[in-house]
Amino acid sequence: MASRKTQSKPKRSRPFQVADEIKSWVVEQGLQPGDRLPSEPEMIERFQMSKGTIREAMRLLQAQGLVATKTGPGGGSFVGEVSTERAHALLANFFYFKNVSIDDIYQVRVALEPENAASLAGRLSAQQLQELRGIMARYEAPAETAEEERAQHIDSLLFHAKLAEFADNAILGFMIGFLAEILTELTVYKRLYSKPNHELWREGRDHQVALLNALREDDPNQARSVMLEHMELARRLMEDQEAVVMKRFIAE
Amino acid sequence: MASRKTQSKPKRSRPFQVADEIKSWVVEQGLQPGDRLPSEPEMIERFQMSKGTIREAMRLLQAQGLVATKTGPGGGSFVGEVSTERAHALLANFFYFKNVSIDDIYQVRVALEPENAASLAGRLSAQQLQELRGIMARYEAPAETAEEERAQHIDSLLFHAKLAEFADNAILGFMIGFLAEILTELTVYKRLYSKPNHELWREGRDHQVALLNALREDDPNQARSVMLEHMELARRLMEDQEAVVMKRFIAE
DNA sequence: TAAGATTTGTTCGTATGTATC
DNA sequence: GGATACATACGAACAAATCTT
């Protein structure tokens, strides 16, 4: 039997190796966001590699949002917390070539948004409730034109994004926020609404009023069921829309 | 009133600009995974920038999984589809500094897994069902040691990851798969189970048997409710465990 | 305001590694 | 094996940003 060549590794190029080592190093040292990383010359010395290679490694980490760099005195590379926006963008790239339908998005929203609403009941500060009311105020009157309705739709997505931001559960909040974000991108680039529908507008608005009450009154079950109704209404509303989404990369 | 300084742009460095342009270009041209990108010298010519800058830009895109490069004749840069594994890793980085509790993960699993189970009822091929049975076979007998139980737990997570892989809804599937992945990483690095519990093992196994039946018999409601029970059991099982997770970056 | 120090950002020339023919 | 085409890597110099004095 011919023994297999000991070539188990596809051979990672040097910048990737360096990036991996830095990542491990950050974890081992328990470094926190804002902590300093070694300067370029120090890394050149430590890894015995050229400046270009080190810089490419840093770019790999920067793209993932793991480090940030500043020029000038006191500058250098720092551990960076991945921002929500960047995480949204990176994830949107993943879905770019998949075909995701609007109903796919809503299937997940229907499952997640009521859960978040229930969790938030009785836990929002007066200021947070006020912020939500402020967003709702932007669509107090029914839209008269398709353009107005589009703007209101985006504002209502902002309402849901705010709720996601307030979530204690970081995973739940992130996922809901992501769905709101891609729906927003969608409506910016496509005309989803042809004609305003005042009855649906009223129904949706009643939901949000009831939801705010339930959130304030610390009534998780009511918050959950109101949000569920709201999501199912929205799902029906979007039902006839184009099935293909993700026409572009979300900007970072 | 002092007028605000017209410093709207934080000024992106050149590699980022180049990366952005290439991204836009891919979208505009409707390029697909596997399509060729211009060679290094061509990009140097087109962007009028040095090799180093171009290479750093390519590294930015590589880190996001958007392009892949090969050396040698016929080599070059190609549009690359972001792999599920890479997307998992990038997202795990986002949660690294957040504090995510095990219950946070389960709150989302309880909401999503039953939905996926219902969607899959009656839609799995004989081969897919066989694959699921093959995984289940790995934990047919109750574990005798904590070590065995740990291995079984990971196998059962693999069962859920498989279900996620089979999902038609790419978003739903991705999110469920991600949760299974981080739970797997968790159990690899921590001892979650202290002593085997045969009754809980039997209960969990009964769930999966019933689930497979419901999936085969095209009974969405049954699949959903069985999975819901299963998730709630698992959630109770994990309840006493350590609250802090994400002790490391998931490898790419 | 201006000069100097510090650190990353960018360029160019050259050489090496690797895969295909 | 040799030629070719491509990415990969190095080193030295210069440019730009930003902080301090």
Image: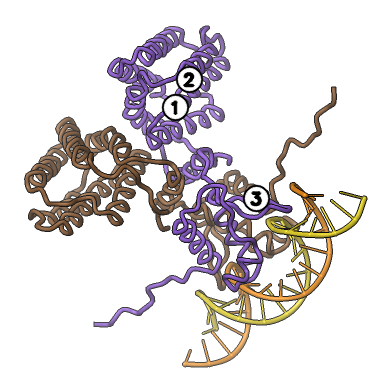
Chain colours: A brown, B purple, C orange, D yellow
Q: What residue did someone put label 1 on?
A: B166
Amino acid type assigned to the residue bearing label 3 in the image: Phe
Mark 1: few/some/many CA within 10 Å (<14, 14-19, 20+): some
Is B189 displayed left or right of B244 in the figure?
right
Q: Position of residue B230 (x, y in %)?
A: 36, 17
Is A34 displayed left or right of B54 in the figure?
left
Q: Of residues A133 and A37, which is closer to you in this image?
A: A133
State how far apart marks 1 and 2 are (Cα).
8 Å
Amino acid type assigned to the residue bearing label 2 in the image: Gln
Q: Of residues B160 and B82, which is closer to you in this image?
A: B82
The residue that appears at 17% across and 38% down in the rendered structure is A233
Q: Secondary structure at mark 3?
A: helix
Mark 3: few/some/many CA within 10 Å (<14, 14-19, 20+): many
The image quarter containing residue B241 is: top left
Q: Nearer the viewer, mark 3 or mark 1?
A: 1
Q: Position of residue A169 (x, y in %)?
A: 34, 39
Quarter of the image with the C terminus of chain B is: top right
Q: Secondary structure at mark 1?
A: helix
Quarter of the image with the N terminus of chain B is: bottom left
